[in-house]
Every structure is written in structure tokens, then in C-alpha cells.
Image (spheres, rainbow, N blue to C red):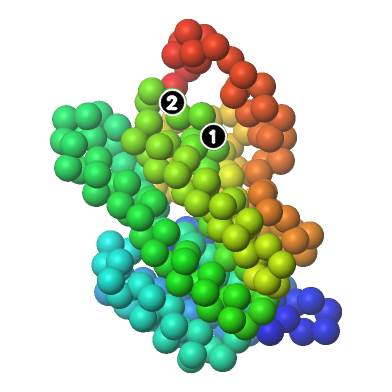
């Protein structure tokens, strides 16, 4: 539970190999969090565990498969039972993928959507039930500006993020008044290994920028966080463009 100063004590990262998820955990540990659970496929995240341990946190690594939806509720309940109290859960699973491949291989596209959306739904609902029961805590959902208006160049990824963003906001409304909250994080282009093959977009950010924005959003009790914040104004305009213009926008 947060201390008297409102500092987060316990953090769970679902998708512990995510560079953004790890950066958020690092930032929260530097701010005072003392307990971290990294949920990772195969249960292997030794480097991240060592790094967070050196910062002063007690770190537990558990096996987590984003596609094994039948295991998610059991896993989430076990994490909450082991920690006793959870302040922040970061839903960080995701893959950018290859739009050209997805158009050639529909099954690969469907698998990507399962990773970027379906797993978040099953874990998110399980987390929400636990947060509601304890009466506090925040689920941080890593959405993307790609879901605000899908582009031709990555519409499979974008459609999954659009669904994820809608899920996060709907779940936030469903939890209103329970003490539990949801925060949707909408980064633009983030410099990561996953995005290295894509040319950087204007207003690109680092994983540390996203982590700083998340920490600030948690302090403010924000429901939506844009990274950088000025993208909110940009997309307010872009959403109004006629489709004939949108189709001609640079990819």
C-alpha cells in the first residue's frame, strides 16, 4: 500500500521483458517502491531482476504467457496473494510486428492482435477484480497513439491498440467509485529495440520519458496520459482530417 506520502510500494509488470515496462518499474523503485513482480514468458528476467535489486527493490520473477488466457486469472490472484497488497500493475505486453507480413499471412496478423489486445483483456479484468477487492490501486495500460486513428502503414497494430485503448477507458469507467483506477498511456514513437526498424517519427520519446510521464500521471490520478503531452493537441486535429487527406499522410 502507498505510504503516508502517497509513494507506491508494490509494482507488478505484466510483460517483464518490455523496455517500457522495465523503465516504469525502475522509475517507481527510484521513487520509493520496494517490491516488484516481473511476469515474463518462461520466467526468465535475470538482468532486470538484478538491476531492480541493485536499486533496492525485492524482485520476484514469475512465468507469464500473454496468449495463455486460461492461466491469467489464476496467475493474477497468486501475485496479489503473494504481495498481500498491490499499488500498481503495468500491462506492458506488446509487439509492433510487420504490416507487410500481416497482409501476406492473416494468421500472423491474428496472432499479433491476440498478443496486443486479447491478453490485456483477460489479465486486465482479473487485475481489476483484485484491485476492486482491496479498494485501491492502479492498472497502467500501455496503449499507443497508433490506436487513436489507424494508419495504412500499421493498421493491424493500430486496430489492436484502438481496441486496447477502448478497453482501458471502459474499465476505468466500470471501476469508478471503487477506489481502483485505470490509466491509459498513449505514447507516440518510442525509441526501443522493437521500434528500431521503423524511422523515428516527429516528437519521438525515450522509455525514460514514458516512465516519467507514468509516474507523474500516477501522482495526479490521471485517466489518460499522452507522451509527449502535446500529442493530445496534434491528434485532436488529425482525427478531424477527411479520409482522402488521411490516406495521403506520410507513413
Q: Is residue 105 visible?
A: yes
Up-down relation of residue 164 to residue 172 (above or below): above
Q: Farthest residue in the right direction?
A: 5
Tell me residue 38's x, y (percent). 45, 75
Q: Quadrant of the N terminus?
A: bottom right
For this rendering, which residue is in front, 128 or 83?
A: 128
Label 2 crowd (10 A; few <14 / some 14-19 / many >=20): some
Tell me residue 168's x, y (percent). 54, 54
Q: Quadrant of the C terminus?
A: top left
Q: Which residue is mark 1?
A: 148
Tell me residue 30's x, y (percent). 68, 73
Residue at 37% x, 31% y: name it. Answer: 155
For this rendering, which residue is in front, 48 or 82?
A: 82
Up-down relation of residue 225 to residue 49 (above or below): above
Up-down relation of residue 52 to residue 246 (above or below): below
Mark number, residue 114: none
Residue at 49% x, 90% y: name it. Answer: 81
Which element is circle 1 on?
Answer: loop
For this rendering, which residue is in front, 199 or 18?
A: 18
Mark number, residue 151: 2
Amino acid at each position: 500500500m502507498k505510504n503516508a506520502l502517497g509513494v507506491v510500494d508494490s509494482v507488478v509488470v505484466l510483460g517483464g521483458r518490455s523496455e517500457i515496462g522495465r523503465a516504469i518499474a525502475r522509475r517507481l523503485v527510484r521513487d520509493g517502491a520496494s517490491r516488484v513482480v516481473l511476469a515474463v514468458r518462461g520466467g526468465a528476467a535475470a538482468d532486470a531482476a538484478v538491476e531492480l535489486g541493485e536499486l533496492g527493490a525485492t524482485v520476484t520473477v514469475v512465468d507469464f504467457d500473454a496468449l495463455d488466457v486460461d492461466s491469467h486469472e489464476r496467475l493474477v490472484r497468486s501475485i496479489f496473494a503473494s504481495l498481500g497488497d498491490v499499488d500498481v500493475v503495468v500491462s506492458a505486453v506488446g509487439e509492433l510486428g510487420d504490416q507487410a507480413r500481416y497482409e501476406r499471412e492473416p494468421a500472423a496478423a491474428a496472432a499479433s492482435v491476440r498478443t496486443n489486445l486479447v491478453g490485456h483483456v483477460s489479465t486486465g479484468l482479473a487485475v481489476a477484480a483484485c484491485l476492486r477487492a482491496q479498494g485501491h490501486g492502479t492498472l497502467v495500460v500501455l496503449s499507443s497513439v497508433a490506436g487513436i486513428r489507424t494508419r495504412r502503414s500499421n493498421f493491424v497494430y493500430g486496430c489492436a491498440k484502438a481496441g486496447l485503448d477502448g478497453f482501458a477507458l471502459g474499465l476505468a469507467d466500470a471501476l469508478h467509485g471503487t477506489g481502483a483506477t485505470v490509466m491509459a498511456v498513449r505514447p507516440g514513437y518510442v525509441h526501443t529495440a522493437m521500434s528500431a526498424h521503423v524511422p523515428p517519427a516527429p516528437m519521438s520519446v525515450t522509455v525514460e520519458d514514458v516512465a516519467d510521464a507514468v509516474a507523474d500521471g500516477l501522482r495526479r490520478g490521471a485517466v489518460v496520459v499522452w507522451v509527449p503531452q502535446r500529442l493530445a493537441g496534434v491528434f485532436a486535429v488529425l482525427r478531424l482530417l477527411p479520409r482522402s487527406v488521411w490516406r495521403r499522410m506520410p507513413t
